[in-house]
Image: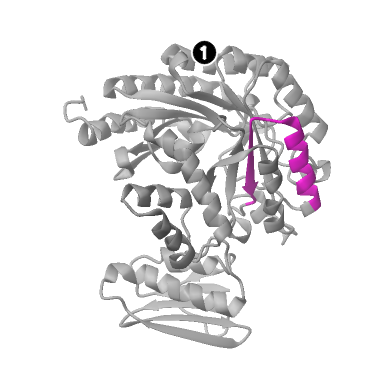
């Protein structure tokens, strides 16, 4: 199957609408003669076509008077044709973006009424009532949190690109501690230097730190002494007493123990993640995890014993070999443990993951039915507080964070709704500078892999000057640049 988009400067919307129905299709410039294909062509009129099993269907529409409208109008024509031809209705309709909740925030800020927003989702985007209610409930919960943001607020992200082993679904920059452990010491040295440089930039710009998030990879792949060194640097640079939240991912029980959990607590972590993904030993083995469900339970007990009272647990719907019953059992186990957050991801097939690169077609089960089981979270007193979507997600579904009342993960809300800057340290880091109101977003990228991060560290420090330049330009002409 191929997708061919012609006559537009940008192919994003028609291509991604077509992928809602045929996610594995290749994008090509010329339409092949016999292969199954989706055609989207803009010119004096708009043309959408589909060829499946030798049968061709075409739809036509007048080209919009405003050329800027052509991309979305063509995508809508493709959507209606494919919905009719395949008999499928994507649950989020023709929405292709990752932040549907942001649409509600933006429309409210622009003065759109609630009924008009509802019609926008249900009629214009063809979103289902269920998904709109989910997005609206999250927007309502987030509203007072976002209203309290200041123009110079920011969050700090610190990346640890090491793991005990690589999960089959993962596409993040992550090196095996067994093979690449020699890089951990020089990496940590450079990382602590970058954190100090970020502190200096933030002070120069008068920024106010709200949350810290140490992620990966797996931060607890560092030794206990390595964690003390890293978190000690954070404590040296910032006033932790003024933070809203300090999260550390302690996701893998095969490298997280009682000593490390005590270190996280001692050095200021107020929220941690212990991420089972599934409580099925068989599924864990299939995705490359070198631990059992019993190890996850042990790690959770150790975290509670160390005093951690704000724990998130991740689950993934659609893992290879899992079933609706198996996922429901994993969800029930997580609910019984009563963590403060449970985040339910839908499996995303990422091109750089081993699951896509090295595997034949797998049985991912009925993912929509797995997400339907999440009604058990609401019954147990959890409520959805943030949501995002990704390209390649099975059945065009979503990732949703659920929390007990008052236990929202603030960093997750801030980064998804793009309400303030995220200054990022470490390999693969992407600093996102946000002008208040989101009118302008600028990114500063670190080198992707640890070895090049270490070699090119002076260049990274030079790039960080862009933080001062951004705030001098958009917030305070008197800020030193």
Tell which of 93 and 450 is nearer to you.
Answer: 93
* Quadrant position of the C terminus in the picture: top left
In the visual, does 316 lie left or right of 469? right
On the image, the x and y values in percent for residue 14 come to: 44, 69
Tell which of 78 and 127 is nearer to you.
Answer: 127
Question: Residue drawn 38% across and 82% down?
Answer: 61
Local packing at callout 1 (Cα closer than 10 Å; few below 14, some 14-19, many 20+) is some
Colour theme: one colour
Q: Regarding mark 1 in the picture, which secondary structure is present there? A: helix
Label tally: 1
Question: Residue drawn 44% across and 36% down?
Answer: 414
On the image, the x and y values in percent for residue 312 come to: 63, 32
Q: Is residue 292 visible?
A: no
196 shown above or below 250: above
Location of residue 262 (image quadrant): top right
Question: Residue drawn 47% across and 45% down?
Answer: 139
The magenta segment: 325-347
In the visual, does 113 lie left or right of 212? left
Tell which of 435 and 136 is nearer to you.
Answer: 136
284 shown above or below 31: above
- For this orientation, the residue located farthest to the left is 478
On the image, the x and y values in percent for residue 468 come to: 27, 29
On the image, the x and y values in percent for residue 458 come to: 37, 27
- Let me know if residue 326 is in the magenta part: yes
Q: Is residue 481 visible?
A: yes
* Quadrant position of the N terminus in the picture: bottom right
Which residue is identified by label 1? 232
Location of residue 181 (image quadrant): top right
């Amino acid at each position: 199957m191929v997708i061919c988009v012609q006559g537009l400067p940008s192919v994003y919307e028609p291509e991604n609408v077509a992928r809602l129905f045929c996610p594995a299709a290749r994008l090509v410039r010329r339409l092949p003669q016999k292969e199954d294909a989706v055609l989207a062509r803009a010119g004096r009129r708009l043309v959408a076509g589909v060829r499946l099993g030798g049968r061709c269907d075409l739809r036509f529409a007048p080209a919009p008077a405003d050329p800027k409208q052509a991309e979305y109008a063509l995508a809508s024509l493709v959507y209606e044709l494919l919905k009719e031809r395949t008999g499928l209705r994507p649950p989020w309709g023709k929405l292709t973006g990752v932040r549907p909740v942001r649409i509600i925030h933006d429309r409210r800020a622009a003065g759109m009424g609630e009924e008009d927003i509802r019609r926008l989702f249900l009629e214009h985007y063809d979103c289902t009532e269920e998904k709109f209610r989910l997005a609206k409930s999250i927007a309502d919960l987030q509203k007072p949190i976002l209203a309290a943001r200041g123009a110079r607020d920011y969050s700090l992200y610190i990346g640890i690109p090491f793991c005990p082993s690589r999960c089959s679904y993962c596409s993040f920059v992550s090196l095996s501690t067994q093979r690449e452990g020699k890089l951990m010491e020089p990496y940590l040295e450079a990382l602590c230097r970058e954190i100090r440089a970020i502190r200096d930039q933030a002070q120069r710009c008068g920024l106010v730190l709200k949350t810290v998030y140490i992620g990966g990879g797996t931060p607890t792949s560092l030794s206990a002494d390595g964690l003390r060194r890293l978190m000690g640097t954070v404590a040296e640079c910032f006033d932790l007493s003024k933070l809203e939240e300090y999260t550390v991912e302690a996701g893998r029980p095969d490298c997280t123990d009682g000593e490390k959990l005590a270190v996280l607590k001692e050095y200021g972590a107020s929220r941690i993640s212990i991420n089972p993904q599934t409580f099925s030993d068989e599924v864990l083995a299939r995705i490359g995890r070198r631990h059992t469900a019993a190890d996850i339970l042990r790690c959770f007990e150790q975290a509670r014993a160390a005093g951690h009272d704000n724990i998130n647990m991740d689950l993934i719907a659609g893992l290879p070999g899992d079933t609706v019953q198996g996922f429901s059992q994993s969800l029930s186990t997580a609910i019984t443990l009563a963590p403060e957050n449970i985040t339910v991801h839908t499996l995303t097939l990422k091109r750089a993951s081993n699951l896509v690169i090295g595997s034949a077609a797998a049985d991912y089960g009925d993912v929509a039915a797995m997400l339907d089981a999440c009604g058990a979270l609401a019954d147990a007193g959890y409520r959805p507080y943030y949501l995002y979507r990704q390209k390649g997600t099975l059945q065009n579904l979503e990732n949703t964070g659920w929390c007990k009342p008052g236990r929202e993960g603030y960093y997750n809300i801030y980064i998804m709704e793009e309400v303030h800057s995220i200054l990022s340290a470490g390999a693969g880091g992407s600093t996102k500078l946000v002008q208040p109101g989101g009118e302008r977003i600028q990114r500063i990228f670190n080198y992707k892999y640890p070895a090049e991060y270490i070699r090119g560290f002076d260049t990274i420090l030079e790039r960080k000057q862009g933080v001062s330049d951004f705030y001098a330009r958009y917030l305070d002409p008197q800020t030193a640049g």
